């Protein structure tokens, strides 16, 4: 399952996806991929800029924080 957010000026996106190959038996992790939109959204995929791996609870906190800052849910971008 993936969750996507886009910032209010539609210049950056973030993808939250579960790390399915996690070897840690005690904690689940999520990747947060950040991308910069170049050109027209939908015609060209965003350029991947960073990837973070966070424990699932921290990733949820980040997701909620971004929503409170004006980021919105968006369909799959890349």
Image: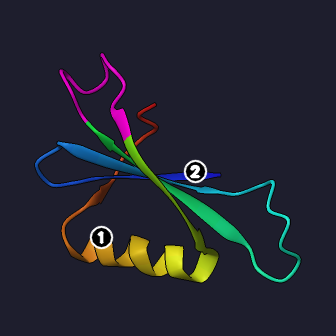
Any magenta on residue 44?
yes
- Element assignment for label 2: strand
Residue at image position (30%, 70%) is 66
Residue at image position (32%, 78%) is 65
Position of residue 44 relative to residue 53, above or below, is above
Q: Is most of the magenta stretch helix, strand or loop?
A: loop
Q: Could you say where residue 43 lies in the image, as x and y percent from the top left?
A: 30, 16
Residue range corresponding to the magenta coloring: 37-48
Q: Residue 2 carries which label?
A: 2
Position of residue 62 relative to residue 16, above or below, is below
In this view, the residue in front, 24 or 59, is 24
* Nearer-N-terminus badge (2/1): 2
Cα distance between the residues tagged 2 and 1: 16 Å
Position of residue 52 relative to residue 76, above or below, is below
Q: Could you say where residue 15 lies in the image, as x and y percent from the top left?
A: 46, 50
Q: Which mark is residue 59?
A: none
State if disc 1 and disc 2 touch (CB < 8 Å). Answer: no
Residue at image position (17%, 43%) is 10
Q: Which mark is residue 67?
A: 1
Position of residue 38 relative to residue 3, above or below, is above
Left or right of 56: which side holds 39? left
- Element assignment for label 1: helix
Any magenta on residue 76?
no
Residue at image position (17%, 42%) is 11
Label 2 crowding class (10 Å Cα cut-off): few <14, some 14-19, many 20+? few
Q: Could you say where residue 63 lies in the image, as x and y percent from the top left?
A: 41, 71
Q: Could you say where residue 75 lies in the image, as x and y percent from the top left?
A: 42, 41
């Amino acid at each position: 399952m993936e969750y996507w957010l886009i910032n209010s000026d539609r210049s950056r996106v973030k993808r939250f996806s579960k790390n399915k190959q996690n070897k840690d038996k005690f904690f689940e992790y999520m990747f947060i991929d950040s991308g910069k939109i170049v050109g027209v959204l939908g015609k060209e995929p965003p350029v991947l800029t960073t990837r973070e791996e966070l424990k699932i609870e921290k990733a949820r906190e980040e997701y909620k924080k971004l929503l409170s800052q004006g980021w919105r849910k968006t369909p799959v971008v890349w």
